[in-house]
Image (tube, rainbow, N blue to C red):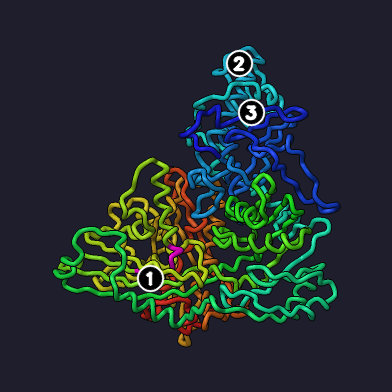
């Protein structure tokens, strides 16, 4: 939605009357026309909603029966955006929550994420709630004032004498009330307030509570629809045979055996591989297996995991580009009593979302309709237009809920959408392009591999006098450094260079002399992408295990050692203290070892304690994970807890098992048999404490991931005295119980 700082309230909100009565609120200048959505019908195909009844700019509807529908511009990838964002609007609106429903918005500039300067609809960097928070509050407050004004005119009283509650405007003096539905048409005629008053958080009635998710019932009865569920008339199904090495192209294709498979309709060569189109998935998959393809590997990627690791470790010996420089590190090192260092390595890792990638495209040569689960619909729609040769107004793009994303569905190159559009362009018939689990696992765009070297100098009083952090990782990380830049631009301040990186916010300890460097390597033939918590996953692992090592070196308890170094970081300290109390730090049962870690990012803070035991034959059992979270204002505490729990399970899967290996450019892993994820019997007890700081909302989706690994590694050290320098733990011959 349009940035409030750049336009007037009247330009930002446009109001009209719904057909049949009611209030329609549009944002960002109203409809752009010609992009009316269609919705699949389980019985007889798509049912089209006319453009004049569903504007692209539509944001909220209040119908005469008192139902309130709020459209959500953020992606729903399991995190609860379809509930949390409507809660923000409903709070300022004083709505009856039991009458609120939500839908995902069309793909239009009106719904762009304010966190990304209103340039794109993008759900990344835990930006859904914190991105949309302020503007959603303002819209809710403005509409509430308009409803009050309508009631005041109806009753011929001063608006200041009226109040609102549960979708009612109430006149206590006159002992009467009117529902929002009754007032909705009249409210559409009211002037839009320029600066509607916002609630004092002390008066919140919805924010801070935990109503059931708005999508819970549909998910329970199976009616909730993901992109993979889309089925439209005359739709075919396609799978794509992709080259064994990235960047290879199909040179010769023998499709005779494939075309002989019953149900196969055609074989088409596209940039991404060779598509087999059939009546159903099973025929398409059988046809693909029957293909014989000779690949042109002139530009093929030849990344080899072992060779890359050796290269990264060599680069650790060379100074990188300085990212943060505090004090005089070299002098502090020279004067130090002792300097110690440690090297860490992290492999490529797969996102492994539950719902494999899939796209439905209905293209007829002059227009297209697309359905897919995505975190970046603006860019996906742009690339779809480029492939199909269509203008934006010729494409109706449905951003569907996703069965997990973790960053994979936020690819700025829109790889899986481009491939589907390339198939549809040749076919010119509705087609669903499906990735199998093997396609997904071997399809690239992994968490980048990384090597890290840390060093710390200890002075004669056992204090840390210098700290250095050097990282080697793929260039995708560079784009992530813009996160802090965006946070600062939101306040119209220009940050110093050191604040443009993840590293600064990831190292909160009071150390006078700090040097952080990066080698951001480029490997165009090895597709890598952000993955849940991004480079915080590796940076915080190294940082927090090394801090534990330093604590032991100077003979201090790891919790107390951290606490002393966080004297100027009250929110870090608060979650650290809270998790220590909740976990009973220092009082674990016999045979159980504890580890602790803390961090702050995405405007939120977390500390975690992990409890483990390790048997004589290296059987590792993770018994409990306790988290303390300060995400500012927790819109829905249950959603926060669910996000943290899911992040812990996601993190444990990566820490224990996650590894994508390449030999001469060929990915070795293919499915969950050789890329395991955490099983139910391996899942520990998970406890989460929310520390309410009453600050504006921070991000939660990625917050629970980075500290799990170092806390676990620190607990392992407590159990068997062994430092963990690389992941996954199966590489260190642990048996996962």
Give the structural element (helix, strand or loop) at label 2.
Answer: loop
For mark 3, what is the residue?
15
Task: Name the spot of residue 730 as percent of width and height, x first.
Answer: 49, 81
The mark found on residue 173 in the picture is: 2
- Residue 657 visible, this angle: no
Task: Name the spot of residue 541 as percent of width and height, x first.
Answer: 40, 68
Q: Quadrant of residue 324?
A: bottom left
* Residue drawn at 48 percent across, 44 percent down: 117
Q: Is residue 203 magenta?
A: no
Quadrant position of the N terminus in the picture: top right
Label 2: few (<14), some or many (≥20) within 10 Å?
few
Label 3: few (<14), some or many (≥20) within 10 Å?
many
Give the structural element (helix, strand or loop) at label 3.
Answer: strand
Label 1: few (<14), some or many (≥20) within 10 Å?
many
Read off the magenta span. 471-477
Pick whichever, 105 or 386, lies toward us. 386
Quadrant position of the C terminus in the picture: bottom right
Give me the C-alpha separation between circle 3 and circle 1: 52 Å
* Residue drawn at 51 percent across, 25 percent down: 194
Task: Name the spot of residue 35 as percent of width and height, x first.
Answer: 69, 43
Give me the C-alpha separation between circle 2 and circle 3: 30 Å
For mark 1, what is the residue?
472
* Residue drawn at 74 percent across, 35 percent down: 53
């Amino acid at each position: 939605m349009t940035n409030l700082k750049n336009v007037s309230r009247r330009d930002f909100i446009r109001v009209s009357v719904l057909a049949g009565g009611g209030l329609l609120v549009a944002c960002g200048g109203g409809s752009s026309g010609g992009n009316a959505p269609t919705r699949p019908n389980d019985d007889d195909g798509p049912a089209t909603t006319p453009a004049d009844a569903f504007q692209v700019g539509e944001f909220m509807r209040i119908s005469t029966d008192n139902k309130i529908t709020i459209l959500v511009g953020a992606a729903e990838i399991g995190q609860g955006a379809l509930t949390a964002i409507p809660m923000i609007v409903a709070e300022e609106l004083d709505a009856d929550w039991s009458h609120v429903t939500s839908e995902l918005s069309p793909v239009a500039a009106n719904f762009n994420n304010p966190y990304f300067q209103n340039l794109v609809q993008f759900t990344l960097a835990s930006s859904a709630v914190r991105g949309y928070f302020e503007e959603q509050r303002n819209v809710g407050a403005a509409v509430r004032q308009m409803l009050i004004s309508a009631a005041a005119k109806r009753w011929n009283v001063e608006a200041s004498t009226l109040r609102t509650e549960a979708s009612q405007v109430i006149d206590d003096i006159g002992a009467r009330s009117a529902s929002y539905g009754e007032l909705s048409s009249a409210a559409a005629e009211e002037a839009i307030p320029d600066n509607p008053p916002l609630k004092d958080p002390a008066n919140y009635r919805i924010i801070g509570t935990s109503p059931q998710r708005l999508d819970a019932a549909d998910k329970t009865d199976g009616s909730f629809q993901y992109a993979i569920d889309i089925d439209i008339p005359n739709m075919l199904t396609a799978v794509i045979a992709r080259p064994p090495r990235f960047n290879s192209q199909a040179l010769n294709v023998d499709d005779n055996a494939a075309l002989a498979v019953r149900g196969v309709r055609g074989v088409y060569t596209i940039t991404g591989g060779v598509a087999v189109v059939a009546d159903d998935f099973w025929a398409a998959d059988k046809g693909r297996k029957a293909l014989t393809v000779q690949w042109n590997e002139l530009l093929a990627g030849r990344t080899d995991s072992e060779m890359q690791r050796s290269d990264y470790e060599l680069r650790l010996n060379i100074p990188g580009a300085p990212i943060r420089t505090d004090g005089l590190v070299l002098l502090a090192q020279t004067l130090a009593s002792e300097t110690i260092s440690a090297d860490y390595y992290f492999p490529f890792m797969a996102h492994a979302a539950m719902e494999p990638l899939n796209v439905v495209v209905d293209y007829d040569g002059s227009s297209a309709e697309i359905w897919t689960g995505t975190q970046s619909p603006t860019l996906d729609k742009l690339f779809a237009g480029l492939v199909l040769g269509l203008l934006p107004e010729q494409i109706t793009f449905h951003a569907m809920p996703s069965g997990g994303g973790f960053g994979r569905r936020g690819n700025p190159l829109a790889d899986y959408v481009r491939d589907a559009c390339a198939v549809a362009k040749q076919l010119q018939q509705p087609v669903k392009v499906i990735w199998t689990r093997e396609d997904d696992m071997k399809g690239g765009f992994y968490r980048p591999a990384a090597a890290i070297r840390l060093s710390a100098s200890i002075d004669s009083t056992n204090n840390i006098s210098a700290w250095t952090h050097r990282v080697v990782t793929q260039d995708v990380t560079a784009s992530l450094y813009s996160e802090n830049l965006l946070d600062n631009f939101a306040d119209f301040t220009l940050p110093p260079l050191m604040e443009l990186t993840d590293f600064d916010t990831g190292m909160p300890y009071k150390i006078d002399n700090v040097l952080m460097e990066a080698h951001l390597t480029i490997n165009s033939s090895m597709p890598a992408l952000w993955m849940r918590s991004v480079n915080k996953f590796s940076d915080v692992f190294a940082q927090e295990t090394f801090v534990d090592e330093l604590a032991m070196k100077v003979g201090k308890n790891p919790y107390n050692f951290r606490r002393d170094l966080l004297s100027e970081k009250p929110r870090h300290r608060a979650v650290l203290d809270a998790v220590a109390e909740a976990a009973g730090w220092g009082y674990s049962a016999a045979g159980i070892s504890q580890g602790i870690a803390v961090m702050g990012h995405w405007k939120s803070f977390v500390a975690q304690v992990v409890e483990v035991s390790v048997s004589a034959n290296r059987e590792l059992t993770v018994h409990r994970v306790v988290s303390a979270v300060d995400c500012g204002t927790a819109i829905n505490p249950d959603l926060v807890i669910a996000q943290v729990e899911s992040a812990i399970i996601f993190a444990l899967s990566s820490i224990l098992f996650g590894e994508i290996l390449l030999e001469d450019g060929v990915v070795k892993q293919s499915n969950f048999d050789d890329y395991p994820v955490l099983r139910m019997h391996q899942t520990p007890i998970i406890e989460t404490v929310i520390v309410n700081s009453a600050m504006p909302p921070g991000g939660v989706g990625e917050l629970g991931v980075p500290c799990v690994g170092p806390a676990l590694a620190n607990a392992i050290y407590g159990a068997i005295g062994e430092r963990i320098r690389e992941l996954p733990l199966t590489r260190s011959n642990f048996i996962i119980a």
